[in-house]
């Protein structure tokens, strides 16, 4: 009972298609421009993993190794290329993990963890479609992007009470092949700015994260997260050109999640998020905040669920970025024009729903957007 060994395999396949066109309603004789792009993304991942866990007195250990072989095909066709241009990538990577903890008397616990993770490029980051809705700011993706790799080391202290849990973490994160938006003046017209994505730098982050979980009443649970960190971004090089020297800065973010149990199968969730200004590849962003709501009704012993989600209730998701280089200085603001409503119906067959690892506050911020405020889901 004090030792446990697990091993297994996993295979995933996804195929996405995106057709993009530019419409011009200013000139009625040319309502549809020739600018278009057909984008296809196919990804196959085969993985084998093994984990070993053991307990000795107050000590607990778990170590694991996951090997992944990935094949991606990114195909793009536009008005300049009638045939699909295919970018294929094949790579094998190992992802080790190690968790060591010691449980003290009276519900105190100390943990030290190491993980290696991958963040693959998605969506508009890869699509080569040229967005010319703003003729002075042309943006497009990069089909040749490589994934990011992050190595994280954490030291956690956890104190538990009957209805409350407090966790304090000190962490260090080192990321290679960081995917960031890069901007530069167009070679064809210096009055036009172009932006795309590239693996531009390495980054380091050192921070402290506090997480408090409170069961206030039988119908209300609160989870509060505060993350403070110092981030250092390496020099930004694009196409062998130095766009910006190394930079650093201090940032913080906080998130409050309230879960409600109303009875008769009704549950609700309210999530508030705030992020302070932070360093990006060629500049910085201002702060932003958001509020999301969710309501769910369960039927048939929770096998059938109807959910309503409202994102950006306050219509506050706007991002203001300031970027600069040797030959330009630019302020840019993007609005999401919320709120956004979604209605979903799910039916669970047995216990087939995969377990989702809870994301930390810093993971939510990294995954939610790029520095321009775009979602990649």
Image (tube, helix red, strand yellow):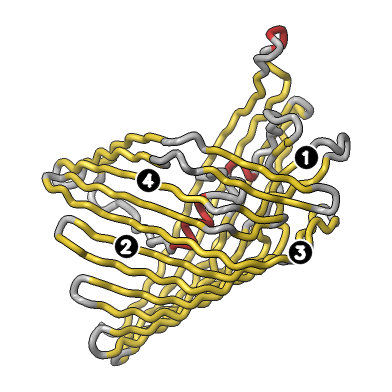
Residue under circle 1? 193
Between 4 and 211, the one nearer to me in the picture: 211
The quarter of the picture where the N terminus appears is bottom left
Mark 4 to mark 2 CA distance (whole Å): 15 Å
| Quadrant in the rendering for residue 273 | bottom left
Nearest to N terminus: mark 3 or mark 1 = 1
Nearest to N terminus: mark 1 or mark 4 = 1
Q: Is residue 269 above or below residue 51?
A: above
**Disc 2: CA contacts within 10 A as few (<14), some (14-19) or many (>=20):** some
- Residue 235 marker: 3
Residue at (21% x, 47% y) in the render: 267
Between 353 and 217, the one nearer to me in the picture: 217
**Disc 4: CA contacts within 10 A as few (<14), some (14-19) or many (>=20):** some
Residue at (62% x, 41% y) in the render: 333
Mark 4 to mark 3 CA distance (whole Å): 36 Å
Q: Position of residue 41 (x, y in %)?
A: 60, 41
Mark 3 to mark 2 CA distance (whole Å): 37 Å
């Amino acid at each position: 009972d004090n030792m446990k060994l697990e091993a297994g395999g996993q295979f995933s396949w996804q195929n996405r298609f995106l057709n993009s066109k530019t419409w011009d309603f200013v000139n009625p004789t040319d309502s549809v421009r020739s600018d278009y792009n057909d984008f296809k993304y196919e990804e196959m991942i085969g993985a084998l993993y093994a984990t070993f866990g053991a307990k000795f007195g107050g000590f607990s250990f778990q170590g694991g190794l996951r090997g992944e072989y990935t094949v991606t095909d990114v195909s793009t066709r536009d008005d300049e290329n009638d045939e699909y241009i295919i970018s294929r990538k094949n790579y094998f990577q190992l992802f080790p993990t190690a968790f060591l903890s010691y449980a003290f008397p009276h519900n105190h616990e100390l943990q030290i963890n190491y993980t290696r993770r991958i963040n693959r490029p998605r969506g508009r980051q890869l699509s080569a479609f040229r967005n010319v809705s703003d003729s002075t700011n042309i943006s497009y993706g990069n089909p040749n992007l490589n994934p990011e790799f992050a190595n994280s080391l954490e030291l956690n202290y956890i104190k538990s009470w009957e209805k409350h849990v407090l966790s304090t973490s000190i962490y260090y994160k080192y990321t290679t092949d960081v995917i960031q938006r890069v901007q530069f003046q167009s070679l064809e017209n210096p009055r036009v700015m172009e932006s795309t994505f590239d693996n531009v730098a390495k980054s380091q982050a050192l921070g402290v994260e506090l997480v408090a979980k409170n069961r206030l009443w039988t119908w209300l649970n609160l989870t509060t997260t505060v993350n403070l960190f110092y981030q250092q971004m390496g020099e930004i090089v694009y196409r062998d050109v130095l766009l910006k020297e190394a930079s650093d800065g201090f940032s913080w973010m906080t998130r409050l999640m309230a879960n409600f149990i109303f009875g008769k199968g009704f549950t609700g969730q309210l999530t508030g998020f705030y992020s302070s200004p932070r360093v990006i590849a060629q500049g910085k962003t201002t702060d932003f905040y958001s509020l999301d709501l969710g309501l769910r009704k369960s039927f048939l012993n929770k096998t059938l669920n109807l959910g309503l989600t409202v994102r950006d209730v306050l219509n506050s998701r706007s991002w203001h970025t300031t970027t600069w280089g040797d030959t330009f200085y630019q302020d840019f603001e993007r609005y999401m024009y919320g709120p956004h409503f979604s209605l979903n119906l799910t039916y669970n067959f047995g216990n087939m729903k995969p377990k989702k690892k809870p994301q930390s506050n810093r993971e939510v911020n990294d995954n939610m957007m790029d520095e321009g405020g775009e979602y990649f889901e």
